[in-house]
């Protein structure tokens, strides 16, 4: 039974591949430029090429779609990438698990559950909602594994990592794009990957959206204070005004279009994952203290 991870060269895809290999299972990591973990079959492929995607997935029982592209390229490339992943999974007769985010819901009031209506407003939110619906029309089992902002070793581009933990690990001041006393669910990358492996292996997950487990939700200020105690640093986080984000986005393409998602920082963003644990049992999540220490060590290294 071969597990294939699309986007195994970095981020959540690399961690999924690492964990499956650590379990002693056969796993194939697909990426454009390599970088897959030890023990993982290294396959190079351009997932925007349907024939290459189908070939890379051949013989798979489960396919984890964890590949992503920078924000400015979403509209041009994600539909093709998703369509090719579906075609590849269908060709192999394999279950497809998407490493998804929470954008499809749009602005919300109250905790997010799997039953929260999708009411996307911005272009990226509408695109993620449409792509999720497209995947669920596939002829093979599909699972949408949705997680909140994650951080951890390998979490390139993570807001919590890049704005909070990386500066603190390097002796600098943490920054954030919204109010500091608003609760926000931050997940640990390793826990998110483990949950997605569970969802890929268990047929009870098929055909549904699931929220992956995370440690307790804290306000941003509380999270930074906890990180300060773990890392032995002091100092209050700096809140960046919206105008700063707009200005920086002129020079950093990763932030272009992020303004439509500002409600995720200015309003409570609390993710309920009780459905996962009610169905599959408790998933031991890494306490924030331990996760922060591991992440800081990675940034320092």
Image: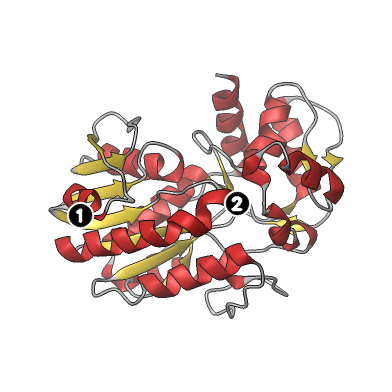
Q: How many marks?
A: 2
Instruction: Kindly identify the residue that appears in the image at 27 percent across and 71 percent down.
Output: 141
Furthest residue in direction top, as rendered: 301
Q: Is residue 11 above or below residue 283?
A: above
Q: Which residue is mark 2?
A: 149
Q: Is residue 213 visible in this depiction of the protein?
A: no
Q: Secondary structure at mark 1?
A: helix
User: Quadrant of the rendered structure where residue 209 is?
Assistant: bottom left
- Please name whichever residue, 62 or 88, is drawn nearer the observer in this view of the structure: 88
Q: Is residue 280 visible in this depiction of the protein?
A: yes
Q: Which residue is mark 1?
A: 54
Spot occupied by residue 159 in the image (x, y as percentages of width and height): 65, 44
Q: Secondary structure at mark 2?
A: loop
Instruction: Kindly identify the residue that appears in the image at 72 percent across and 43 percent down.
Output: 249
Snapshot colouring? secondary structure
Q: Is residue 209 above or below residue 97?
A: below
Residue count near mark 1 (Cα–Cα under 10 Å), binned few <14, some 14–19, many ≥20: many
Q: Is residue 71 above or below residue 133?
A: above
Residue 104 located left or right of residue 284: right
Spot occupied by residue 67 in the image (x, y as percentages of width and height): 40, 48
Quarter of the image that includes the C terminus: top right
Residue count near mark 2 (Cα–Cα under 10 Å), binned few <14, some 14–19, many ≥20: many
Q: Give the number of the mark in front: 1 or 2.
A: 1
Residue 120 located left or right of residue 172: left
Spot occupied by residue 176 in the image (x, y as percentages of width and height): 78, 44
Q: Is residue 244 above or below residue 101?
A: above
Residue 122 located left or right of residue 195: right
User: Quadrant of the rendered structure where residue 294 is?
Assistant: top right
Instruction: Kindly identify the residue that appears in the image at 29 percent across and 44 percent down.
Output: 20
């Amino acid at each position: 039974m071969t597990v294939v991870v699309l986007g195994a060269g970095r981020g959540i895809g690399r961690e999924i591949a690492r964990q499956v290999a650590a379990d002693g299972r056969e796993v194939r990591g697909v990426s454009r430029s390599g970088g897959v973990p030890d023990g993982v079959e290294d396959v190079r492929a351009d997932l925007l090429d349907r024939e290459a995607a189908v070939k890379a997935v051949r013989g798979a029982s489960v396919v984890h779609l964890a590949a992503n592209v920078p924000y400015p390229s979403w509209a041009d490339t994600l539909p093709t990438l998703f369509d090719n992943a579906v075609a590849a999974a269908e060709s192999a007769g394999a279950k497809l698990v998407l490493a998804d985010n929470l954008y499809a819901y749009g602005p919300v009031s109250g905790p997010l559950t799997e039953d929260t209506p999708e009411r996307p407003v911005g272009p990226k939110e509408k695109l993620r909602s449409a792509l999720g619906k497209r995947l669920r029309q596939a002829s093979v089992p599909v699972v949408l594994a949705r997680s909140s902002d994650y951080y951890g070793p390998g979490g390139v581009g993570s807001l919590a990592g890049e704005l909070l933990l990386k500066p603190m690990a390097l002796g600098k001041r943490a920054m954030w794009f919204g109010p500091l006393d608003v609760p926000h669910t931050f997940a640990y990358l390793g826990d998110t990957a483990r949950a997605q492996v569970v969802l890929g292996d268990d047929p009870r997950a098929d055909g549904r959206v699931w929220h992956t487990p995370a440690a307790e939700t804290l306000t941003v200020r509380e999270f930074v204070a906890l990180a300060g105690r773990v890392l032995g640093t002091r100092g209050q986080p700096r809140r960046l005004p919206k105008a700063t984000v707009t200005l920086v986005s002129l020079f950093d393409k990763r932030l272009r279009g992020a303004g439509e998602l500002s409600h995720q920082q200015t309003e409570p963003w609390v993710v309920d994952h009780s459905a996962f644990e009610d169905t599959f049992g408790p998933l031991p999540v890494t306490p924030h203290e331990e996760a922060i220490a591991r992440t800081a060590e990675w940034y320092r290294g």
